[in-house]
Image: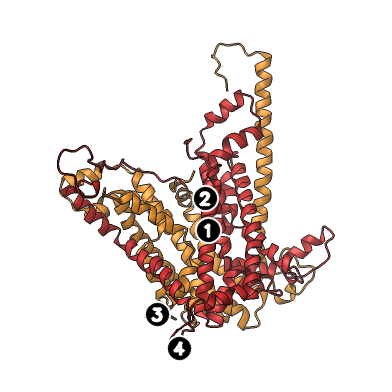
Amino acid sequence: MTTTTASAPVTPDRRSLRRQNRLRRTTSGIIARAILIAVSLLFLVPLYWMVITALKSDEELALFPPTLLPESWNFSVFAETVNAFPFWTQLGNSVLVTVASTVLAVLSSYVVAYGFACIDWPGRDKVFYLVLATIFIPFPLAIIPMFDLFAGLGWVNTVLPLIAPNALGSAFYIFLLRQFLLQASTEAMDAARVDGAGEWRICWQVVFPTARGALIAVSIFAAVAAWNDFLGPLIYLQDPSVQTLAIGLQTFSTDTDTEFNQLMAASTLTVLPMVVLFIFFQRYFVRGLNVGGFR
Amino acid sequence: MTVTTPRPAPPVTAAASPVPPPRRGRRPFTAREKRNLRLGLLFISPWALGFLVLVAYPLVYSLVISLFNHTGFRTPTFIGLGNYSRLVQDPLVAVSASNTLFYAALAVPIGLVVAIVLALAMNRKVPEVGLYRTALYLPSLVPIFALSFIFVVFVNPNSGLLNQFLGLFGMPETNLLGDATSAKVIIVTMAQLGAGNAALIFLAGLNNIPESLYESARVDGAGTLRRFFSITLPLLSPTILFNLITGVSGALQVFTQAYIVTEGGPNNGTLFYMYHLYKSAFSYAQLGYASALAVVLFLAGMVLAVLIYVLSRRFVNYDVTG
């Protein structure tokens, strides 16, 4: 806007301009709201349909046209579903893979990011470009070599192939954490160095606590990725007792004569942990996307 | 994507120095630099090992094993370029490649437009924006396999909601998954539910554009469209490029939706390249042939990424920062 001195009389011209401005703001606000409401509803419809279908009785499912709300809320479907396939075992496997993958990926990526951000060594930035380049390497190329490698180690049909590679860091998480560490103040680090603290100790005792927000953001990304992985478990886990929910749901839906309500109940139970995670840590999600310094 | 470069690297050339020229034009490292180099390499060693095991080894192994008849049961036998000549003649490669390109050509541009529109709308900063952000991001958290099951139910001609909705517009009841093209369009539509993720990245980009630029443009009489094309789009271009490259790379790997919802059908209409690769490797135990497929996919992905990068250089603006 043009700057106005406080004492300047408001001319009719200026007033109409301001009114025009306000009008423009309101209309664009209305359009923005309309788009957001419409798309939000559209995005929630599949989730709504999942929950509603789960809660319908078998008879109601057969009705045409389908009812938009269950006539009777059949909550016992969750108990039936949990008993229809090895739900608890596979939930345990999913949790094990997710927690182990997340912890390993975050800690190893943090150490590597520290090496790229907090230690000034010759050639560092050139090597970092190599890290960035690997973000864009398509994953399918690694499927067969890694399968042969893990088969040789006797790891097929165990969760190890899904967990172990995370100990070697992940290019994208290294990138995110490095961006954060570069913005952090170096004063405490330099002071600790003057006091003669070793780099390893500075890494964990001085810098690690200050990186909490970024570490949580990356943990959430890693957890969601591990929980939602499908191709990895599909290739490596054949036995129902070692399978994760991703594959359990798949065999459950094809092996038995599964009713839609049970399939949707099982899906709801699988989706729920991620929804809860998101609701509790929403601000870290958003911050994580900002930390990346995308412009 | 911008990479923050920290402190400028110390000058390494010592050309004007009167002392005997150091080898390869570099002065030797100081003791501190040597120490830091050792420490730095030690800290990045997990990644270095990961690069060897997860990137370099697969690259070399794939290239080598693609020249073999490898089933995983017997010792692989060398067959030269046999897998590649088979690949060229395999009708399913042509079908799956064109299915994948069809998917990528629709899903990637639509995804970018949807994400940018949502980001612009959220940037209007209506008071209840947190509500929309939650609603729009939620489907991004739903695993693709679960979303696929939901769509199996959703699109079902008998009890699904979609047919009923289309019926409101006078569309006859049809099995949308029974036709090759509409099945692909359904999978493209499904992909849009993930737009919340990209929208939040674009929103972060929009927040970095200084408001003063818009103010002065307004004073100069630039209209809404002019401001969008002259300020917003150029300043958002690095983010668009990043999303475009990762989007294309992801689209080339589309697999799970087709595996669960359509099982590649009808009539191979949703047999995507990655699905063909998976089947070759794990249903038919043709690991050598599947490696040749993977090598071709890798090359195609790299060529596309570089092509997009080079072509975009004229349009992408890294200079004006917020």
Residue B213 image point, x, y percent: 54, 30
User: How far is the residue under mark 3 from the one under mark 4?
Assistant: 19 Å
Asked if the residue under mark 3 is in contact with the one under mark 2, i.e. CB atoms within 8 Å, the reply is no
Q: In the image, what residue occupies the spot 37% across and 62% down?
A: A169
Badges 1 and 4, same chain: yes
Badges 3 and 4, same chain: no
Q: Which residue is mark 4?
A: B74
Q: Which residue is mark 2?
A: B309
For badge 4, the amino acid type reads Arg
Question: Looking at the colours in the rendered structure, which chain would you say is drawn in red?
Answer: B
Q: In the image, what residue occupies the spot 84% across and 65% down?
A: B172
For badge 2, the amino acid type reads Tyr
Q: In the image, what residue occupies the spot 68% across and 65% down?
A: B184
Q: Which residue is mark 1?
A: B303
User: How far is the residue under mark 1 from the one under mark 4?
Assistant: 34 Å
Between residues B6 and A278, which one lies in front from this camera angle? B6
Q: Earlier in the sequence, mark 1 or mark 2?
A: 1
User: How far is the residue under mark 3 from the one under mark 1?
Assistant: 34 Å
Q: Which residue is mark 3?
A: A155
Count the labels in the image.
4
Kindly state the secondary structure of the residue where label 3 is placed.
Answer: loop
Residue A122 image point, x, y percent: 26, 49
Residue A95 located left or right of residue A259:
left
Residue A284 located left or right of residue B111:
left
In this rendering, the answer to whether A126 lies above or below A19 is below
Q: In the image, what residue occupies the spot 50% across and 82% down?
A: A240
For badge 1, the amino acid type reads Val
Kindly state the secondary structure of the residue where label 1 is placed.
Answer: helix
Indicate the chain on which mark 4 is placed.
B
Residue B53 located left or right of residue A33:
left
